[in-house]
Image (spheres, helix red, strand yellow):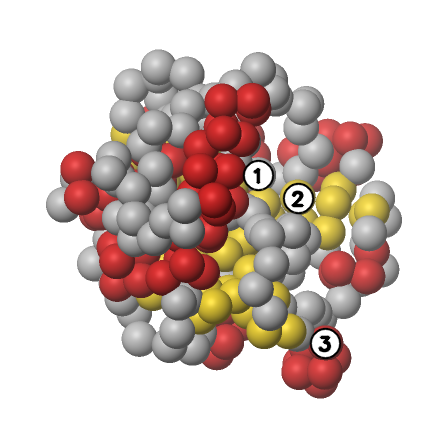
Amino acid sequence: MQISLIITTYNRPDALLLVLKSVEHQSLVPNEVIIADDGSNDKTQELIDDFITHSNINIIHSFQKDKGFRAAKSRNKAISKSTSEYIILIDGDMILHHNFVYDHKKNAQNGYFTQGGRALLGQKKSNEVLRGKYVAFNLLSSGLNNRKNALHSNLLSKLFSRKKNYLRGLKTCNVSFYKKDCISVNGFNNNFEGWGREDSEFFVRLMNKGIKRKTLRFNAIQYHLWHEVVSRKSLLKNDQLLQKAIDENLDWCEMGIQHFL
């Protein structure tokens, strides 16, 4: 099964570099890495160009103009460029455990999407990591919050991972699904602009379509670099779009990935 790893980014080339370095160290390297760029300046393009010259990773830069936070549209555009049957979505400030891609692949299951977890790096530790440009972490690494999420164990993962549909904790910073399932609900809703709920609304439509949630524990681990809290000014409008999908049991959106296919 071929895998496309899609990384969302916006003007954080220092963090994106570490994410890409962690992809290089994967026990299973994805068939392609697509960078879903929501309008970054030239520094991100320069980083990507430089990385490509020194790496064997197959990297595609999917770019859209900067018109504010439009992660839904950026993800759709990137997914439309993918040539693989299975998609893993992460954010551009998530350093990956070396078995991250392998864990998602081994847990892939028809009729399910898979949600992973993350350990949080504090502000001081994140700054140290960005300066030192290192990507190797484990359960005992200093500066980790919610440390239990850094424990990698196949046995514990089998015991504590769950298959149950609910919205809490669903995030596109660590999720995977079959591309065909994404297309069946028309992907993300391009009408979402500004931070918040575009991921939840997508998952609601997947579950309404009959695609169930699998929540991984102790596998598919990420280390999340600290960042400032982004603006929540669009949250009220986006909450309304999410509630509409819930109330009307929607499994399709009109403005979705078909715009790019």
The residue where tag 2 is placed is: 224
Amino acid carrying mark 2 in the image? His
Any mark on residue 160, and which? Answer: 3
Q: Label 1: how many residues lie within 10 Å, few (<14), some (14-19) or many (20+)?
A: many
Any mark on residue 93, and which? Answer: 1
* Marks 3 & 2, CB-CB < 8 Å contact: no
What is the quadrant of the C terminus in the image?
top left
Identify the residue at image location x=60%, y=69%: 164
Residue 193 at x, y percent in the picture = 41, 23
Up-down: is 190 above or below 58? above
Residue 245 at x, y percent in the picture = 43, 43
Label 2: element kind: strand
Q: Earlier in the sequence, mark 1 or mark 3?
A: 1
State which quadrant residue 159 falls in.
Answer: bottom right
Amino acid carrying mark 1 in the image? Asp
Q: Earlier in the sequence, mark 3 or mark 2?
A: 3
Amino acid carrying mark 3 in the image? Phe
Question: Does residue 63 appear to the left or right of 196 in the view shown?
Answer: left
The answer to which of 11 and 67 lies nearer the viewer is 67
The answer to which of 134 and 203 lies nearer the viewer is 203
Q: Residue furthest front?
A: 248
| Distance in Å between CA atoms under marks 1 and 3 | 26 Å
* Marks 1 & 2, CB-CB < 8 Å contact: yes
The answer to which of 242 and 107 lies nearer the viewer is 242
